[in-house]
Image (tube, rainbow, N blue to C red):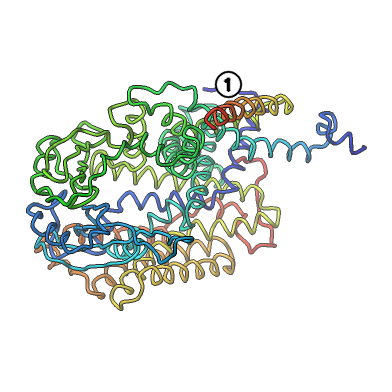
Amino acid sequence: MTTADHITAAGIRQRPRLRAWTRGVLAGPLAFVASSILMAGAALYLPEGAAGIDNLVFPVVLFPLIWAVLFLYALLDRRLLRAYVVIGLVLASHGGLIAAHLGSVA
Amino acid sequence: MIKLSQERTKELLAIHGWSGIILGLLLYAVICTGTIAVFSTEIGDWSNPLDAPATEGLPPNINALVQELGDQVDPAYRDQFFLYSSGGGRLMLQFEGHLEQDGDDDHPGAEEHYGVLYEIDPNTLTLLNRTEGPEAMLDAARRATDALADFFVDLHVRLHIPNPWGLFVTGVLGLIMMVAAITGFLVHRHLIRELFTIRRNKEALLRSRDAHVIAGTWTLPFAFVLAFTGSFFSFATSLGLPAMAMVVFGGDQERAIAEVFGEPPATDETPAPVANFDAVIADATARTGARPNFIAGSFYGRADSQMRAFTPAEEGDLTGRSPVYSGVTGEFLYDKPVLVGQSPSAGNAVAALMAPLHFGNFAGIVSKAVWFALGFAGAYVALTGMLLWTNRRADQRAWQRMGRIVHWMGYGLPLTMAMTPYGTFAGRWFGWPLETAQWTAFGLAALAALIVALGARTAARARDLLVATTGFALLGVPLVRYATGGPGWLGAWSDGLMTVIAGDLIMMLGGVICLGLWRFGAGTSAEQAGQANSRPGRPGRSNPQVTA
């Protein structure tokens, strides 16, 4: 097997240990970072409520649940590549939202 | 019944087991100490009582004393002031400001929190102690009044790891516990039946597995709630609020705090009289139906001073209230939500629910007892889960060692917790630094437990030794408390210090139960089924067909 094979989906599929590590990275650090980014980004579009703080409080309260959903999804989706895409989309959309907001503030 | 394919069930079971075993030892410590921390107020009253029990909430007729002491504090250290209760019901009056360090025009000195802490007997309104210094010194003085409860609470909240890392660790442990609860729920193929199933005639490992499942199933909702609220508390301040401040407010912490906790009043440094504390407490009591147990104020003796009284939850309510008053006239200004925002909101209501759900303090001693029992069951589930997992892999040397470590933590932690009061009482009696004394007792017990867990001929022997020692240690705690200057039972009875007697009886009961388990207990699967029957390196019998 060549080095190029290792990083393709087929290459990963054929190597159980590499597959386990790849999934572990997704379910561990990446799911945690995605949950944190989702939590912070959600404050920018959730309704503020009567006291103007609901958009800040609800994402913080729901953070453990958001993480649990992403963590279990990352471990249970049989198609690892799709799981990477989904969590990548969460990261990219909310990361982009945060970057756009901070850019407009600056 | 939840229908899952065999393969999916296997995957979930693997997630359940691995999530538990990887951080299970620390999680077990957090659950055990959390179970004890439910009674932190009572532990404070038991371990460091005054001559007579204090009344609920802030004591009456304190205005003259508070004003006299407040006037003695340098105005530079009166930016904030607090009135609250500590161990034994002691009334604490704290003033805090900023101390500017020496500097020059180019390098202005850093500011550090500095203040004065008064410790007051709430029954006689006499001054017991006065501490002046930086925030850390004030914190140490406050902790000295409630040292034993604080030790357990700190172990539970952050495993004594400095913030914010300690909160991160316990937050992750909460997440792991939540995953274990969710996957435990999903893999139950016959949820209702498993609530009542224990196969008495089957082999020990199966019986133990059934006991783990029964305890786990009954406590599943509670485990989920505790894990969820626990991770919220850990991450809210260490990750959530800083992230919000960074993203929503562009890193402007002051604006974030103003948005969440309210704008401070307009600055007016003109000296002004101080409101009557007794009148404020009386008004808050009449207004909310409960006597305040905490007052937080700003700018004592200035025209812009305000104070906020916090009252406990009334019957039927999950959270208390916090009316705000002028710190000059004592006039009621407005009712502020207890946690966040300036007016009632869904966000505040949800956030305020987290504390009673986690601490179990919404219905006094009854709900605390229920939370204690459920926490105890949670610790049992965590321990038996780890024992089952290691036992199933007992034919591998590494897992044998892990099994011994699980025994060390599982049966050694109760011993170290039982030994901690020895350090507290001895430290107070001999005048040693309390935290050092507590760590010494805790550390020596942990070391002894490690030697026993690794050195005993069998794990069953290690368990027996540790359980028996814990029993004797618990039986000795009341004696040590009395020998180091604590009140005796007759004196406590005549002074109405029922918490002291109740605390001693609970220690003794715990001791008797441990000795009973040691003498007559059937042991756990690990002892009976093989893994733990030999030192690491000598594989015991195991049953690979049985799943954890």
Nearest to the observer: residue B256 or residue A74: B256
Nearest to the observer: residue B473 or residue B41: B41
Classify B138 as above or below A15. below
Q: Which amino acid does the dot numbered 1 rest on? A: Lys
Q: Position of residue B267 (x, y in %)?
A: 26, 44
Quadrant location, the C terminus of chain B: top right
Can residue B215 be seen here? Answer: no
Instruction: Please tell me in which quadrant of the rendered image residue B491 appears.
Output: bottom left
Q: Position of residue B509 (x, y in %)?
A: 30, 58
Q: Position of residue B122 (x, y in %)?
A: 13, 59
Can residue B182 be seen here? Answer: yes
- Residue extending furthest toward the front: B105
Residue positioned 53% across, 34% down in the render:
B184
Q: Residues within 10 Å of mark 1 (few under 14, many from 20)?
A: few
Q: Chain of mark 1?
A: B
- Residue extending furthest toward the right: A2
Residue positioned 49% across, 44% down in the render:
B171
Number of marks in the rendered image: 1
Q: Position of residue B241 (x, y in %)?
A: 45, 39
Instruction: Please tell me in which quadrant of the rendered image residue B415 appears.
Output: bottom left
Say what secondary structure mark 1 lies in. Answer: loop
Q: Is residue B514 left or right of residue B303?
A: right
Nearest to the observer: residue B139 or residue B375: B139
Mark 1 lies on residue: B3
Residue positioned 40% across, 23% down in the render:
A48
